[in-house]
Amino acid sequence: MNAAHYEYVRRLGDNALVLGQRLSEWCGHSPFLEEDIAMANTALDLIGRARMLYTHAAALEGRGRDEDALAYGRDEREFGNFLMCELPKGDYAFTLVRQYLLDVYHHRLFTALTTSRDETLAAIAAKAVKEAAYHLRRSGDWVVRLGDGTDESRDRCQAALDELWGYTDELFAGDAVDAAMAEAGIGVAPASLAEGWRAEVEALFDRAQLALPRDDWQASGGRAGLHTEHMGRLLAELQFVPRAYPGARW
Amino acid sequence: MSSKHLPLWEVFIRSRRGLDHKHIGSLHAADPEQALQAARDTYTRRQEGVSIWVVRSSDIHASQFEDEAAFFDPAADKIYRHPTFYDVPEELKL
């Protein structure tokens, strides 16, 4: 039970860290100054979420590791984030459509986790759900703006959605860890989020005049540590300094 | 980075309940919703506020520098407009 509990909480942290790292790549490169600050804020929210989840996971694991050991001391196969989180940031439409798909998911997930039997996880969820509500408001607003915008912005948005759609099944697949945690009242069965998520994103894509892609291919494996070719490079950048200079402080 | 197509907005923040909104800065945004979000992200990151107003800068009508003499100088010698000009009876003093 403890191993599954650790795995469940740490994987939530993996999603937050990897997505936060991707968003942070926009810092200094966003289309205009206000967006640059807003995107960096969101990235920092996610990295803050990862810190809380990793600290809790490390305590559950009980092997003396801390948040830094989990973030910087693990290799690709030991990360259990969704593949969608690690995909390169692409253009602004891609970043925002991905963010929207995941914001809807996380808003619903953390809302459900506020009643977890794990009181620490419930407290983390209570904080995360407020941030996620704002992230969702922002990313949803942008998807409608871009989808219902110019020909170019709609084309880019539609292309992003078409590319990302095949990574959405993974959000709801679940495995033995999820099942055990849902059974114990600690976690949420991912499949239970699917229907509400789908209805919410369909309604927004309708407003944004974006067509829902066909369900003709699905990629998965991230949660089991089987990642895309992009994950290694992301970790190389994320982990370079603490690996090259162990224990470095400034 | 370019914002040449987006209108300018003035941002007012109420720092605590009971206080007035104060002008804190400006930003570029396409419409009121985006302006509010940008104001939240730009100006309230360190708990600076509990309420935000945004106003299109073009909707603010400002007095001009050349109005200064006519607008403000005449008040300079009218010290009787200040409450401190008047002697308050001893009985009213706290």
Image (cartoon, grey):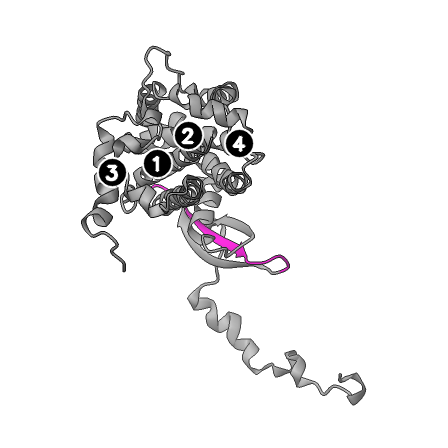
Establish whether labels 1 and 4 are both on one chain: yes
Label 3 crowd (10 A; few <14 / some 14-19 / many >=20) = some
* Position above or below: A52 against A201: below
Q: Which residue is mark 2?
A: A102
> Label 1: few (<14), some or many (≥20) within 10 Å?
many
Task: Please determine if labels 3 and 1 lie on a single subunit.
Answer: yes
Distance from Cα at disc 1 to Cα at disc 4: 23 Å
- Identity of the amino acid at label 2? Leu
Give the mark nearest the N terminus, 2 or 4.
Answer: 2
Chain for disc number 4: A
Looking at the picture, tell me which residue is in the foreground, B41 or A70.
Answer: A70
| Labels 1, 4: front one | 4
> Where in the figure is residue A225, as x and y percent of width and height?
30, 27
Q: Residue at x 40, y 41 (%)?
A: A50
Which mark identifies residue A186?
Answer: 4
- Quadrant of the rendered image containing residue A29: top left
Chain-order first, disc 1 or disc 4: 1
Q: Tell me which numbered mark, 4 or 3, is placed earlier along the sequence.
A: 4
Q: Subunit of mark 1? A: A
Q: Give, as a single range, the part of the protein colored magenta.
A: B5-18
Q: Nearer the viewer, residue A7 or B49?
A: A7
Q: Is residue A75 left or right of residue B69?
A: left
Query: Would you name the residue on which mark 1 appears?
Result: A19
